[in-house]
Image (cartoon, grey):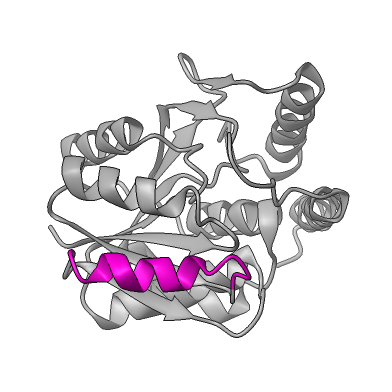
Amino acid sequence: MKRLVIIPTYNELANAPILIERIFKHIPNAHILIIDDGSPDRTGEKIKEIQKRYPGLFLLERARKSGLGSAYRTGFAWGLERGYEELIEMDADLSHRVRDLKKMIDAKELQPNTDLVIGSRWTAEGKTENWSKSRELLSRAANLYVRAMLGMGVKDSTAGFRIYSSSILKKLNLEAIKSEGYSFQIEMTRAVHKLGGKIIEVPITFRERENGVSKMSKNIVREAMLLVTIWGLKRFLRVK
């Protein structure tokens, strides 16, 4: 199975090298694609050093910060062109554990017709560590709203820890997926669901980053809630 782990980076010098080492140690048959958005902390330069040790490590450098959704769309296109069968989303900040990635891979192997595996914080046995109560409530409430408006039955639609099958990505019109941040993850889930794709959730432990600055902002949250409202109204009004 050809697997590609896609990791967007922006100022992740303290975290990305550690994650790369862990992936290659515990998921030895995977390749990694780093998409760096011109990190001022020279993350890209460090990745070039590490590439000398790992032939399965690839780097795409972009001139400026262009957004999470844009990075993943670029990564999906790159991976599909090169024949990868599974394309994995993973954060660079060590909030996603490699041991959980192994669980997700194992779950997909047990159900090989699965189109999307979501590493879920809010399914049974999923959890978070070092989160404030207010942030946990915000995430839970957002996902409840998504379920109510979009009717997908997914408990963690905003999760960014995922495995997509290449077959489902080839069916999607990735150029039509325009949103970023949380809303990108929701829009991708919605697109897979509309195609009748099989989605499973695997419980994970999400750890708050220890180094660096979170990319979360109020604008990202507002974008997500606005788009979910629009998509939900279209669903209720039966508008395509």
Q: Main secondary structure of the magenta part?
A: helix
Give the magenta-colored segment's residue range. Answer: 39-53
State which quadrant residue 187 falls in.
Answer: bottom right
Q: Quadrant of the N terminus?
A: bottom left
Report the side of 157 relative to 100 (left or right). right
Asked whether residue 44 is drawn in magenta, I would say yes
**Where 66 falls versus 97 (above or below)?**
below
Which residue is at a point 66% across and 75% down the rendered structure image? 66
Residue drawn at 59 percent across, 53 percent down: 185
In the displayed structure image, the side of residue 113 where residue 29 appears, left or right? left
> Horizontal placement of 224 versus 181: left or right?
right
Q: Magenta segment: does it hold 59?
A: no
| Rendering coords of residue 141 (x, y %) | 78, 28
> Can residue 150 be seen from the camera position used here?
yes
Quadrant in which the C terminus appears: bottom right
Query: x%, y% of residue 135?
Result: 76, 28
